[in-house]
Image: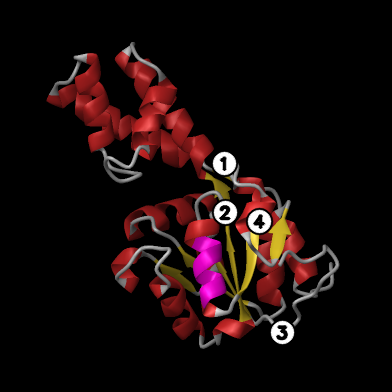
């Protein structure tokens, strides 16, 4: 059941965050990367390339999506493919923007004794690059990816691994994420407090569909929900 804005969860000792579209705007960066690839090719449509990444044919970050797009346009050759992949990765990383209040709020939570972790389905090398690029990596005690936990969300393995590393029971932890299926659902199954990052919901699920205990219009609202006084 969604809580009201005034509800406090003072018993929370640890917060596990999803990464992409929870801490920073990853889809926006990804769309810009697709636009730059199309600009380099000189043909096609950025949204068509972006749609390949979200189609499920390959992984959300798999370069075979670019290969297939070049094949469709009839412009594939190894050199072009290599430049397109490099352009995609460089622009995607460079254009990531941290959501307002994220860094300040994480530091505020850590200063208040809240333990912090990331649980993401990104590959470990990608997760480290993005967290390093945004300057957030040192704020988290634990970063969990499928290579570490053994399974992707919505399986609870990454959340359970983070909880063990943080030495925190599920009932004393919060899961924050933009996906009702991959973040909120496993958190609820484990008995965690759940917070839906509505500001990062690019799928348009809507708060009513998320099924979370808390709906965040801004990441900075976390401190209030955790009963941590403002500075």
State the extent of the magenta-drawn residues as a range.
183-189
The Cα atoms of the two marked residues, 1 and 2, are separated by 8 Å
Give the label, 3 or 1, closer to the camera: 1
Q: Quadrant of residue 85?
A: top left
In the image, 133 versus 43, the foreground residue is: 43
Task: Give whichever of discs 1 and 2 has the lower sequence position.
Answer: 2
Give how far across and how far down residue 2 sits, in percent. 73, 64
Task: Kindly identify which numbered label has been placed on residue 11.
Answer: 3
Q: Tell me the quarter of the image containing the C terminus.
A: bottom right
Q: Quadrant of residue 10?
A: bottom right
Q: Is residue 63 magenta?
A: no
Point 75% across, 73% down: residue = 226
Task: Give whichever of discs 1 and 4 has the lower sequence position.
Answer: 4
Work out whether residue 95 can be spotted.
no
Q: Which residue is mark 4?
A: 102
Task: Kindly identify which numbered label has been placed on residue 178.
Answer: 2
Q: Is residue 5 left or right of residue 85?
A: right
Point 63% across, 68% down: residue = 194
Find out whether the residues at labels 1 and 2 contact each other: C-beta distance under 8 Å: yes
Task: Give whichever of discs 3 and 1 has the lower sequence position.
Answer: 3
The Cα atoms of the two marked residues, 3 and 4, are separated by 21 Å
Local SS, label 4? helix
């Amino acid at each position: 059941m969604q809580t009201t804005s005034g509800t406090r969860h003072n018993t929370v000792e640890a917060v596990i965050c999803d990464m992409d579209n929870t801490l920073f705007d990853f889809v926006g960066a990804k769309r810009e990367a697709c636009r730059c690839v199309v600009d380099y090719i000189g043909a096609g449509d950025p949204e068509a390339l972006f749609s390949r990444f979200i189609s499920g044919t390959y992984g959300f970050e798999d370069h075979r999506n670019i290969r297939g797009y070049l094949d469709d346009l009839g412009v594939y050759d190894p050199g072009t493919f290599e430049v397109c992949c490099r352009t995609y990765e460089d622009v995607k990383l460079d254009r990531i923007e941290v959501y307002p209040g994220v860094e300040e709020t994480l530091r505020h939570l850590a200063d208040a004794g809240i333990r912090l972790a990331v649980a993401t389905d990104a590959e470990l090398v990608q997760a480290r690059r993005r967290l390093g690029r945004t300057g957030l990596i040192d704020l988290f005690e634990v970063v969990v990816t499928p290579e570490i936990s053994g399974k992707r969300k919505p399986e609870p393995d990454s959340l359970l691994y983070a909880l063990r590393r943080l030495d925190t029971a599920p009932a004393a932890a919060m899961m924050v994420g933009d996906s009702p299926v991959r973040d909120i659902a496993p958190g609820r199954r484990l008995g965690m407090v759940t917070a839906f990052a509505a500001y990062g919901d690019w799928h348009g699920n809507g708060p009513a569909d998320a099924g979370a205990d808390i709906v965040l219009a801004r990441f900075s609202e976390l401190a209030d929900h955790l009963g941590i006084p403002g500075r």
